[in-house]
Image (cartoon, grey):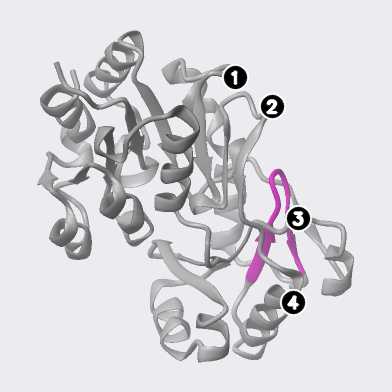
Amino acid sequence: MSDIKIVSIDIDGTLLNDQHEVTPAVHQAITMALEQGIKIVITTGRPLTGVRPILNELGITGSDQYVITHNGGLMQTADGSKILFATPLSLTNWKMINQFMQANSTYIQVESQDSAYTTNHRVHPWASFENSLVNLPLYVLEDDEALHDVEIIKGIANAEVNELDEIQARIPALISDAVSVIRSTANNLEFINKQASKGNALIALARELGVDMSQTMAIGDQENDLTMIEVAGVGVAMENAIDRIKDIANVQTASNNDSGVAQALETYVL
């Protein structure tokens, strides 16, 4: 039997197929792992509001299960009752990011644990789609001063792929030196605390549970999965993963449309 005790799994392009479904094979493999006492940790850029339906579907519930959200900005129990790892974005850094994005006419919003805020009065269609997908209410503010009492977890810009490519290439060192800038999907450009990452959150969870990192596995496909693939004892790249993920992963599994998560669990865990 495998010695893996924690499995960190990305959602989009990994856990879900292109129809945004958990395949029966993936569902069965996760159920078997949970029955063996293995911690299946959904690890995502989404807030908890956008993960709950998936957690409920998979039976990952209660105060003895865990979820990593906001690309590692938060690690908490699956029922949301306890936060074990949190790395907020400072209001000073947010103001600097927001000013740069406004100067470049690109939509951006910030997210707290359960809400989104923007000073843009025209919400980009991609942002509307994203907020609907993750069940996050959006509040339009007159200025950033209204965020003084809000714990900012991350900033997220939503736009067409080519626009974000151009913006990302022009981000000044003042910003990139202060925060981490990552892409979780082609239409999202995210800004998080330098200490916030899926990898750091996985390390924090392993420490909390007394699990050696050699007993962890991480499965992902995109740039925001890089850190957890690097730190896990077994880093798994989906067949549909970007080249950077495949280059650093220990092993590769089938694509998200071919139940790659199930294949990885059956091969290295169950």
User: How many tags in the picture?
Assistant: 4
Residue 81: x and y in percent read 69, 27
Res. 15 in view: yes
Q: Are marks 1 and 3 in contact (CB under 8 Å)?
A: no
In the picture, measured across the screen, residue 167 lies left or right of residue 269, that is: right
Residue denoted by label 2: 81
Q: CA distance from mark 2 to mark 4?
A: 29 Å
Image disc number at residue 75: none
Disc 1 element: loop
Q: CA distance from mark 3 to mark 2?
A: 17 Å
The disc, 2 or 4, on the residue closer to the chain's N-terminal end is 2
Disc 2 element: loop
Image point (35%, 57%), residue name:
227
Does residue 112 belong to the magenta stretch? yes
Residue extent of the magenta highlight = 108-118
Q: CA distance from mark 3 to mark 4?
A: 12 Å
Image point (44%, 81%), residue name:
168
Q: Are marks 1 and 2 in contact (CB under 8 Å)?
A: yes
Residue denoted by label 4: 92
- Mark 3, other Cα within 10 Å: few <14 / some 14–19 / many ≥20: some
The disc, 3 or 2, on the residue closer to the chain's N-terminal end is 2
Residue kind at label 2, given as amino acid type: Ser
The disc, 1 or 3, on the residue closer to the chain's N-terminal end is 1
Residue 125: x and y in percent read 58, 62
In the picture, measured across the screen, residue 161 lies left or right of residue 253, that is: right
Residue denoted by label 3: 151
Q: Nearer the viewer, residue 129 or 102?
A: 102
Q: CA distance from mark 1 to mark 2?
A: 7 Å
Image point (54%, 61%), residue name:
126
Residue 70: x and y in percent read 55, 50
